[in-house]
Image: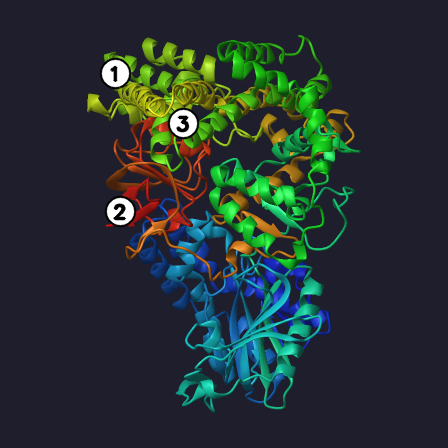
Amino acid sequence: MTMPDTGRPPPILGLEAVTAAMVPLVGGKAANLGELLAAGLPVPDGFCLTTEAYREAAADAHRSGGPLAEVHRALKATHDGDLPALAALASRARNSIQNAPVPTEVAAAVEAAYVALGDNVPVAVRSSATAEDLPSASFAGQQDTYLNVVGAAAVVEAVRDCWASLWTDRAVSYRASRGIDPAAVSLAVVVQRMVDATAAGVLFTANPLTGRRKQAVIDASPGLGEAVVSGAVNPDHFVVDPLTGRVLERRLGDKRIAVRPIPGGGTRTLAISNGGAAACLTDKQAAELAAMGRRVEGHFGSPQDIEWAIAGDGRLWLTQSRPITTLFPVPQRAAGVGTPGGEGTRVYLCFSLAQGLTRPITPMGLAAFRLIASSVARAAQFDVPEPRRGPSPYAVAGQRIYVDLTAVARSTTGRRIVPRVFDVMEARSATVLRRVFEDPRFSVTRRTPLGLLRHVVPAAVQAGVPETLLRAVFRPDAALRRTNRRAREFADSLEPPAGLTPLQRLDHAEHVLGTRIFSVVPSILPLPALGFAALALAGKLLGGGRWDDLQVVLRGLPNNVTTEMDLELWRLAQVIKNDGGSRAAVSDRTPAELAEDFRAAQLPAVLQSGVARFLGQYGHRAVAEIDVGMPRWSDDPTHILGVLANYLRLEDSALAPDVQFSNAAEEADACVDRLVAEARSRGRLRGIAVRAALRRARLFSGLRELPKYQLVVGLAEVRKQLALAGAALAAAGVVAEADDIFFLDLDEARAGLDSGAGDLRDLVAQRRADYAVELERRHIPRVLLSDGTEPEAIPSGDAVTASTVPGALSGSPASAGVVTAAARVILNPVGAHLEPGEILVAPSTDPGWTPLFLTAGGLVMEMGGPNSHGAVVAREYGIPAVVGVPDATLQLFTGQEITVDGGAGTVVPS
């Protein structure tokens, strides 16, 4: 059905005329139904009132000075957390729509289209929002649906009610939380012939619990599907293999109610006795549904959430399809990069999380790591034909880096080594990997370490690792001096000659990434590795079971660049505190205002010079600093100025971080003396060995931060050169601003500088939008299989709880001690406010977070293991810490009093 051409969009379209390109006109629901019809799939007849009809009906309310225009302005000025204010504005908007008459032309068109469906035919009237059922966001349930509507007048009224539901409280708050412009939304309405269903429900073409693709999950109940969609019934549940039709899992629900149509219009809810006695679908019907879902997924090219109904004659109908927005993407390699070790199911580990990074990485950040990863692979004598595409194990999912560990899973040596490394880095990843190793699809095919040694030994020899280790064992002070000298030489060697062209700057950035950055790591990494090995040796010489004592040994470690940075910032805070003008500025102004004044050199002299001095030494650092696309502190000092403001709130001198750090070092030295004396009592040589081991443990363990620090030094230089190249792109009009280069990759930036790429602004805008969507993602799988399965999400019968206290959360012990205080949940440290003594609850941490540690009373992290970055720093500062606590930032809330037991690994809400 189409309307005459009047030069403007039609108010009504038949569903058969609707396509995916019409979302702004017909909304997501109608667009998807039109696509299903075009694919020859069974969809009930119907028509769509376009957004033009809504705009005509709301025209007066939308005009300047009208009630909706006023609501739009008020919504933009209302904080998304002010729910009462949002609800009041939503009510005003609804009233303005419900009080507006339906235009005569629109009402007549609805009546004509309805009559064309049949004589008083029952229909479903469903809202179809322009921002609905899209891959980036699910607006399901935000607007209203009316079932079994009979009669033209009733259909017109149902349409008006759907329009008003664009402004329900839940829809308004949902849009506000996502920053969607209230003036930009409108509503279409779908009217379809009702299916008098004997059974109905929902079908997911991928398993929404485990993420596994090509596995259909069906929830079904007698009567209309509203009972399942609304959650009012406990439905039958089927898991089906869509390729074979085999039912893999069947669980009958009690199905205590059914929603049925009422003759003449409306629905009623009926009680069902003994609903759980039999399934409402046969296995054959479940298989047919799964096969139908496979067709739908094939048409849309992505997993779908489908609503369906089976009529009394047994015919299957599809009433809705939308993308499943909760699935994490499957890891993908760059085009042309082969699969290591052949095809079959693969296992991927999230490298981003292992580095304490939960947020997405910019496109240029991903490109940078492809080059770095290629340099690592080539150093180990692996073949990397195209370094810009990365080595074969490198993959990306959800703009995070994943590494293919299938070869590790199939190797006896890999199974032994890698989980042990993650036991101390990111303990939950180690647990998940061990579960994956039990999967028969990853059975061992390599039982000797010869293949690994063939790659590792030559690389280690070439990097001088044996010499470094020998020097550290026999001449530890000389080894430390040599390492520090090499670190200085590395930093000094990064700056390019003056007068480079933009293309030459890009060349220099690629050279640093592909050749220089990784080269410094093997000269440093053996020392902290030796430090922790020496600690373990001391523990064995002392008889084992001495973890609590060994934790104390690691407190107040010297030679930790991150600790030195934090204490330097603390000392700056004390200088500011003693200068009246500087103290007043920090106390009275926001960090953003202070940052603006700093850039204009308008801060009080003491504060200006102090911040400049700090940034001169540490300005290359940042939050999420392994991403070259993230601004460094020298680019934007807002975070540092906010941390200084937090430090000034600490009044108790006994809690001063420098005092606590000094006390921790003295406590560690005393512990070393005590342990040496204990060992000496069992033999003079044992005492000498324990002292030597503990001395090297303290001397070298703090260096664990130095390899990453040097990596960040290199990335800061790369960022500087890329930003200058980006300025050239912006000057040429290829991008809008210099920082847009970080939303390109190296090839695209080079093509832009060569004037061969044309205008890249639309590409950058799309990538910025995609990046913003990924920033909202809270759950990042540690381990993923190539079929989308998240092993951690599969129920396990061997879960062990670290505490029997009701409500206790369990994790890995990271820093001994018990503290009870208010929690402060922080997802992003930039601009974060942490009161002295509060317990920091975070998804993970990197060095950009650690200034907050100085005034924290305790630490809880979702990621990490006993030797992850946050755990080590927490021990050095002597604050209780538990890491690897699943969903801690979701289960705990700011202001909640919690008890953190860093020895037991528990977090107990009060």
Q: Which of the marked residues, 2 or 3, is nearer the chain's N terminus? A: 3
Q: Is residue 772 above or below residue 686?
A: below
Q: Which residue is mark 1?
A: 577
Residue occupying image coordinates x 32% and y 33%: 833
Task: Name the residue furthest front.
Answer: 683
Q: Nearer the viewer, residue 176 or 358?
A: 358
Q: Which residue is mark 2?
A: 896
Which of the colour schemes (rainbow, by chain, secondary structure, one colour) is used? rainbow
For label 1, the crowd category at 10 Å Cα-Cα, with few meaning under 14, some 14 to 19 and many 20 or more, is many
Residue 177 percent location from the top left of the image? 42, 50
Where disc 3 sits, the SS reads: helix
Residue 249 percent location from the top left of the image? 57, 74
Q: Which of the marked residues, 1 or 2, is nearer the chain's N terminus? A: 1
Q: Which of the marked residues, 3 or 1, is nearer the chain's N terminus? A: 1
Amino acid type indicated by mark 1: Lys
Q: Nearer the viewer, mark 2 or mark 3?
A: 2
Spatial separation of the CA atoms under disc 1 and disc 2 = 30 Å
Q: Nearer the viewer, mark 1 or mark 2?
A: 2
Q: Quick check: can you spot residue 4? A: no
Q: Which residue is mark 3?
A: 639
Give the quadrant of residue 664: top left
Where disc 1 sits, the SS reads: helix
Q: Mark 3 near mark 1, Cβ–Cβ under 8 Å?
A: no
Q: Nearer the viewer, residue 149 or 288?
A: 288
